[in-house]
Image (tube, rainbow, N blue to C red):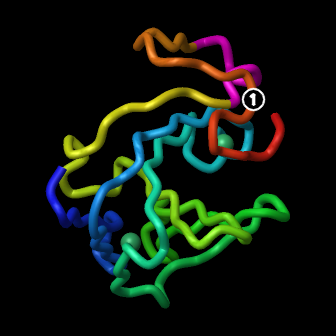
């Protein structure tokens, strides 16, 4: 992982730069992430003061729960962020990075409610609900 990583949405209106280390990628299989992403979330995380945004006005924020908002490009719909209301940090969708190979996988959360037509077979830890340090919506 280099000191700076970059990424952005499909149409290019929203761009971001991260500064410093990124958390391991957490895969969330909850029903909210399933609907919004098409199957499940894969996101790293960074303190808000280590993220630089371009095109911030292009981001649409949706509050799927009363404790976090989900940010996506208002033009192309690319999922970009999950932002807890009470913590100064951004979860950033792994697929939005220009160089996603800079990331490392961590674990799976909210696996209890996942559709059974797909298997999780990567050997990473699985948590049926919230995982260590990550609180999500139930289900
Ligand atoms: Zn876009
Ligand atoms: Zn989720």
- Name the residue at 52% across, 34% down: 27
Look at the picture and state if 137 lies above or below 27. below
- Residue topped by disc 1: 129
Q: Considering depth in this image, is 103 or 32 the residue closer to the camera? A: 103
For ligand 1, which image quadrant applies? bottom left
Q: Is residue 81 left or right of residue 117?
A: left
Q: Main secondary structure of the magenta part?
A: loop
Would you say residue 97 is visible in this rendering? Answer: yes
Would you say residue 78 is visible in this rendering? Answer: no
Residue 101 position by quadrant: top left
- Name the residue at 32% across, 64% down: 10
**Residue 121: horizontal and vertical position, in percent?**
45, 9
**Residue 84: horizontal and vertical position, in percent?**
67, 64
**Residue 63: horizontal and vertical position, in percent?**
75, 67
- Name the residue at 72% across, 35% down: 130
Q: Considering depth in this image, is 11 or 18 the residue closer to the camera? A: 18
Residue 12 position by quadrant: bottom left
Name, please, the residue furthest toward the bottom: 57
Q: Is residue 3 left or right of residue 23?
A: left
Question: Are there few (<14), some (14-19), or many (20+) residues within 10 Å of tag 1?
Answer: many
Q: Considering depth in this image, is 64 or 136 the residue closer to the camera? A: 136
**Residue 16: horizontal and vertical position, in percent?**
32, 73
Q: Which residues are magenta?
A: 110-117
- Name the residue at 46% across, 62% down: 80
Quadrant housing the C terminus = top right
Look at the picture and state if 26 lies above or below 83. above
Residue 76 position by quadrant: bottom left
Q: In the rendered structure, does residue 60 fall within the stretch colored magenta?
A: no
Q: Helix, strand, or loop for circle 1?
A: loop
Q: Is residue 94 left or right of residue 42?
A: left
């Amino acid at each position: 992982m280099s000191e700076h990583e970059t990424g952005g949405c499909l149409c290019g209106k929203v761009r971001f730069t991260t500064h410093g280390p990124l958390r391991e990628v957490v895969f969330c299989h909850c029903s909210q992430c399933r609907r919004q992403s098409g199957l499940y979330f894969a996101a790293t995380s960074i303190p808000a003061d280590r993220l630089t945004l371009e095109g911030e006005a292009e981001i649409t924020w949706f509050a799927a729960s009363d404790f976090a908002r989900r940010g996506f490009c208002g033009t192309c719909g690319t999922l970009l962020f999950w932002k807890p209301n009470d913590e100064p940090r951004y979860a950033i969708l792994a697929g939005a990075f220009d160089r996603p190979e800079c990331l490392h996988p961590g674990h799976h959360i909210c696996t209890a409610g996942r559709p059974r037509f797909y298997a999780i077979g990567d050997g990473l830890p699985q948590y049926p609900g919230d995982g260590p340090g990550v609180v999500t919506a139930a289900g």
